[in-house]
């Protein structure tokens, strides 16, 4: 375990909540602060995408409470999760809200932090490695490269109701961003690809669909943009996935260190 005193890590005080990113799956990608929180938390309120090996690092006797959301399945309501965090903290517990990836990259960490602030609950946000960066790296795809892509756009693949987000200006993104990274987009990938192509992206632009990134079950399918959804379906790719669109995907042929 880590030496908290030597690293001068912040105290995890009773009655406070830490919103912590657990990374995309591989326990080795946990930050020192995340591990520090795990070994001191009285209650761990965790998401569906948190690897069981990470939960096993919690201190003996810590309560583990599932509060995960999965698209298309019955899930806890966000207001109820936020209220639960407030309630546990008001009981004097050290509450670890553990999320896959980064808590503030499509992880609703901002919503939960606002609820805690409104209730005058002390909290800390501990960033994690988001799948849009770590998952790509484990697939041999650097998210940027100064000769190929100097900008990247992260986009959610569904809105609050589960549909293709209408608030996203797909045409502007198609024109402006050399790399597009889509979260939770697999069910709508065909429609999103059609919108991007209609806005000017090349149908043969390379795409990678990465399933269960950074875990032993990781799978990667590459395909032209126009065929990516069909190729992923034919390969049996399932959620959770991260999708990357752009010429940067071509580097995977030389940089696939995990599959080499």
Image: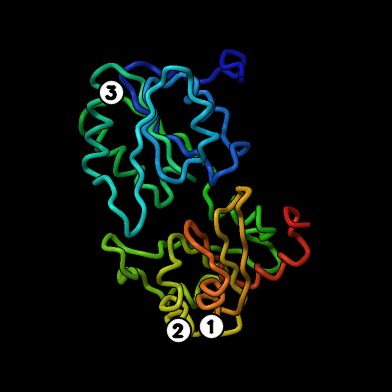
Identified at 56% across, 84% down, the residue is: 202
Q: Where is residue 149 in the image (x, y as percent from the top left)?
A: 63, 67
1 or 3: tag closer to the N-terminus: 3
Image quarter hosting the C terminus: bottom right
Quadrant hosting residue 256: bottom right
Q: Mark 2 sits on what residue?
A: 199
Identified at 23% across, 21% down, the residue is: 90
In front: label 2 or label 3: 3
Asked which secondary structure carries label 3, the reply is helix
Q: Position of residue 20 (x, y in %)?
A: 44, 35
On screen, 195 above or below 166?
below
Image-based side of 253 in relation to 237, left or right: right
1 or 2: tag closer to the N-terminus: 2
In front: label 1 or label 2: 1
Identified at 57% across, 61% down, the residue is: 210
Q: Mark 3 sits on what residue?
A: 89
Asked which secondary structure carries label 2, the reply is loop
Mark 2 and mark 3: Cα distance apart in space: 48 Å
Label number found at residue 226: 1
Image-based side of 208 in relation to 48, left or right: right
Label number found at residue 24: none
- Packing grade of label 1 (10 A; few <14, some 14-19, many >=20) is many
On screen, 229 above or below 254?
below
Asked which secondary structure carries label 1, the reply is helix
Mark 1 and mark 3: Cα distance apart in space: 49 Å
């Amino acid at each position: 375990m880590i030496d908290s005193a030597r690293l001068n890590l912040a105290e995890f005080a009773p009655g406070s909540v830490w919103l912590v990113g657990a990374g995309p799956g591989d326990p080795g990608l946990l930050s020192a602060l995340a591990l520090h929180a795990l070994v001191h938390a009285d209650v761990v309120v965790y998401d569906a995408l948190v690897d069981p090996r990470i939960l096993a690092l919690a201190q003996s006797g810590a309560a583990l409470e599932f509060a995960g959301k999965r698209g298309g399945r019955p899930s806890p309501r966000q207001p109820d999760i936020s209220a639960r965090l407030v309630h546990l903290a008001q009981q004097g517990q050290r509450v670890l809200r553990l999320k896959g990836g980064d808590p503030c990259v499509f992880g609703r960490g901002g919503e939960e932090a606002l609820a805690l602030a409104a209730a005058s609950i002390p909290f800390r946000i501990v960033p994690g490695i988001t799948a849009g960066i770590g998952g790509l790296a484990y697939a041999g795809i650097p998210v940027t490269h100064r000769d190929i892509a100097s900008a990247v756009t992260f986009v959610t693949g569904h809105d609050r109701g589960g549909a293709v987000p209408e608030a996203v200006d797909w045409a502007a993104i198609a024109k402006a961003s050399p790399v597009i990274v889509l979260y939770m987009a697999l069910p709508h990938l065909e429609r999103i690809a059609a919108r991007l192509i209609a806005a000017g992206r090349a149908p043969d632009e390379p795409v990678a669909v990465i399933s269960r990134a950074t875990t032993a079950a990781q799978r990667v399918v590459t395909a032209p943009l126009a065929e990516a959804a069909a190729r992923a379906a034919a390969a049996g790719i399932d959620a959770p996935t991260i999708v990357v669109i752009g010429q940067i995907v071509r580097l995977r042929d030389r940089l696939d260190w995990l599959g080499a």
